[in-house]
Image (cartoon, rainbow, N blue to C red):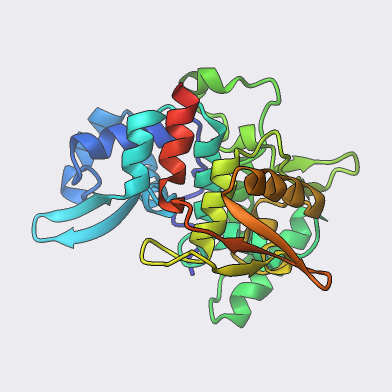
Amino acid sequence: MVVYKHGSFYLRSGWGTKIIYAVKEDDTIFSPNNEQAAVDNIGLGRVMIKALRYWSDALGLTEEEKKPAGISKKKTALFDLIDEHDRYYQRIGSLLLMHRNLARNRDDATAWYWAFNELKNQSFTKEDFVDGFHAFLGVNGVNVKKGAIEKEFNCFKNTYIGDDKFDRKTIMDEDTYPFLAPLHLLKINNEKRFEKVPVTKAEMPLEILLYSIAYDNGDESTSWEQKQISIDQLMEEKYQIGKYYNMRYSKLIEMLMEAENKKMLVLSNNFGNRHIEMTDYPYQDLLRQYYIGEEN
């Protein structure tokens, strides 16, 4: 579990793209002995470069490796897909995947994990967040001063809350705009409380939803055919879509029915206990289907 590795620099709108370009050009760009080159090539200050190094791994775009020559960033399959199809993050699916990776990253994005998996209240104050997250860390043997937790909260909320008039197509022109604000997963309500907002069917591409379900419950080595997953599990358990996408039960059922109509899974009801049964559908191809489909 970590706190404050971002140095209070929240994810800005253009930073995902900066990571793609920087690592593609030089996978050792974030090595300390390349610090000046990183500043010159990426166009950020030294402290921001350190934050970008952290965010690169936390987002699931890279995995850091230590080599004799210094630190190297190994590109993930998701890095390659986004580089090929959406390096400017103009598609909502790319941002949903980035959010998913943060919200499921208990070790390296602990505040994001806690807020979407452990924090039960849909609405909360800054004090609720600070006190609850501080207690969670303490129970898990991490002793951090509340002042640091307050900075962590500010970084967390600044990742999601920005100007509603922002257009994702101008994402690179907005260096201070929150990277994940277009998702509208967090807002300040009329009572001046922070509120987690459910993702809607219109905002959730079906391929992204099914990819999330499949890979929350397996990996490339999984034989998904005939694998059963209960709807209650999807809605209520940690690391599942009901938690980190703030999904409503009715919207999830609507989307699963659509997937069933497309022969992507089977939706069953066994004495009132609803579950899905995976089929021989090529779930490993879902992300490529999403990106190619958007391009056609």
Q: Quadrant of residue 274?
A: bottom right
Which residue is the extreme one toward the left? 68
| Position in image of residue 155 (x %, y %) | 58, 48
- Residue 25: image x %, image y %? 19, 34
- Vertically, is 29 above or below 6? above
Residue sitting at 18 percent across and 39 percent down? 26
Q: Which of 285 and 29 is in front in this view?
A: 285
Residue 163's quadrant in the figure?
top right
The residue at 33%/34% (across/down) is 83
Q: Residue at x 16, y 48 (%)?
A: 33
Q: In the rendering, at what x and y percent does residue 251 appear?
A: 77, 47
Task: Identify the residue at horizontal 68%, vertical 43% (top origin).
Answer: 258
Residue 128 lies, in percent from the top left, at: 77, 61
Q: Residue 145: which quarter of the image?
A: bottom right
Q: Can residue 14 be seen in this view?
A: no
The answer to whether residue 138 of the structure is visible from this angle is yes
Nearer-the-camera pick, 282 or 205: 282
Is residue 195 placed above or below 234 in the rendered structure?
A: above
Of residue 111 and residue 252, the one placed in the foreground of this image is 252
